[in-house]
Amino acid sequence: MKRIAGLSLAAALLLTGCALNPVTGQRDFALVSESEEIEQGRRFHAEIVRRYGVYDDPALQVYVDGIGQRLARASHRAHLKYSFTVLDSPEINAFALPGGYIYVTRGILAYLDSEAELAGVLGHEIGHVTARHSVRQQSGQFATGLLGVLIAGATGSSNLANIGEAIGTGIVRGYGRDHELEADRLGAEYLHAIGHDPEIMLGVIGVLKDQEVYEVERAKQEGREPNVYHGVFSTHPRNDQRLKTVVRAARKLAAQNYRDIDRATYYRMIDGLAWGPSARQGIVDGRRFSHPELRFAIDLPAGWQTVNLDDFLQARDPESGAVVQVGVVDRKSDESLPQLLRRLVRDGEIEVERTSYGALAETRVQIRGGAQQPALLGAIALDGRAVLTLLGTAPADRFDANRARLLAVNESFTRLDQAAIDAIRINRLRIVDASRYPGFVALARASALEGDAEDQLRLLNRAFPDGDLRDRERVKTVLRDD
């Protein structure tokens, strides 16, 4: 009887959960109303802004919003109140929340080359919103979970999908091959509607795929996860015939002369764009790591490779395998630094030494599933409850040889006054006269980029892997603030 009642409930939900798709005009299984969809977007918007921060350039924000609003007015859900935000993140990404909240990172803006290309990315994300992909994904996962409940009804187990997790998966990993292709088709239609050639979308995929190849290889060399784009075109190979078909179909909707791609305006808007980690993540300048918001600086060992992520900074010696990882944690009310260290290592018996800058303990850690190895863990109180943590470790047979260098990172801690903070310089994307440079070697030498600067500049200028500067009037480079 329970199973029969469950099946009746499922049938009722399936019948009442069908909603008209604004794009296809067909009925889809959707358990989230439009008002609920908008509320989801509003709620998650606050979390996105908290996590990434809004890029502090009002003119650029207005520019991106203006392009997005033109596309939105041409979309199948023009009645929604759309929001377009540039996030203060070096990640190469763009994504949409339910209800019309759309984001691009400053990281992806650096790799785009014209207003038309930006419109192509925004149009694709609008397509996810108009086709209600997040809602359809949530409803599909709910139905799968409901089936699990019916099958396991006798045991009383439940496996309903978490809606928040479903939304997060769509943001980070895309919505699956079919939904991504549908967003491509819709984005191409919206581009055509505002007078841009949909064919521009085929050009964007090339640089994003090149960047993906480059980043995967670089991350492998540095022993970290790659920062690759999961959104528009992420499911497509470079020469995707299905993508070409849907894009070129949009060009046949109505005959028209397409507008200029407007590279000049776009270059003017991104000239001066911050490059690399934001002040929220701290700035690496040679050996010096400075954090303007938390008002401190430390010195990293010379020659170590650094990776500055949202949650922590990591410096690694490629020869010895020694690693320093820098992060920030909150301590509990009335918790001392020694108590914090014991809590972090889950070992109340460790020896903790008070230092002039904070506290230090010897412990053991396990790196990427390998054997345990010795480590130094330091804690330094910042403002309020925030505590800077510095973990230094090396393989057991190399720890003693690296101990002094690991300890020196802790001892280099310095608090920054306002004058020191004002003196911190960051890297910025700059648009320069190509005639000043005979080639990418000279451009790289004059830039502020470290490591494989030539490859990075070729990626920025659509010349990867072995192009040159011929026939270019203006080129992108990265320079240190004056």
Image: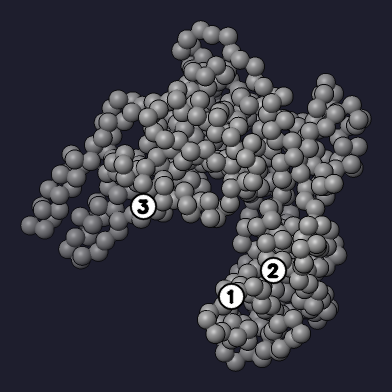
Q: CA distance from mark 1 to mark 3?
A: 33 Å
Where is 342 relative to 71, above or below? below
| Residue pointed to by mark 2 | 325
Where is 199 relative to 434, above or below? above
Position of residue 116 measured from the top left corner of the image (x, y, whole percent): 61, 24
Amino acid bearing label 2: Gln
In which quadrant will I find the N terminus? bottom left
Q: Residue at x 40, y 40 (%)?
A: 99
Number of on-image labels: 3
Left or right placement of residue 366 versus residue 253 in this view = right
| Residue pointed to by mark 1 | 385
Where is 110 relative to 302, above or below? above
| Residue pointed to by mark 3 | 163
Q: CA distance from mark 3 to mark 2?
A: 33 Å
Mark nearer the viewer, 1 or 3:
1
Front-most of residues 10 and 313: 313
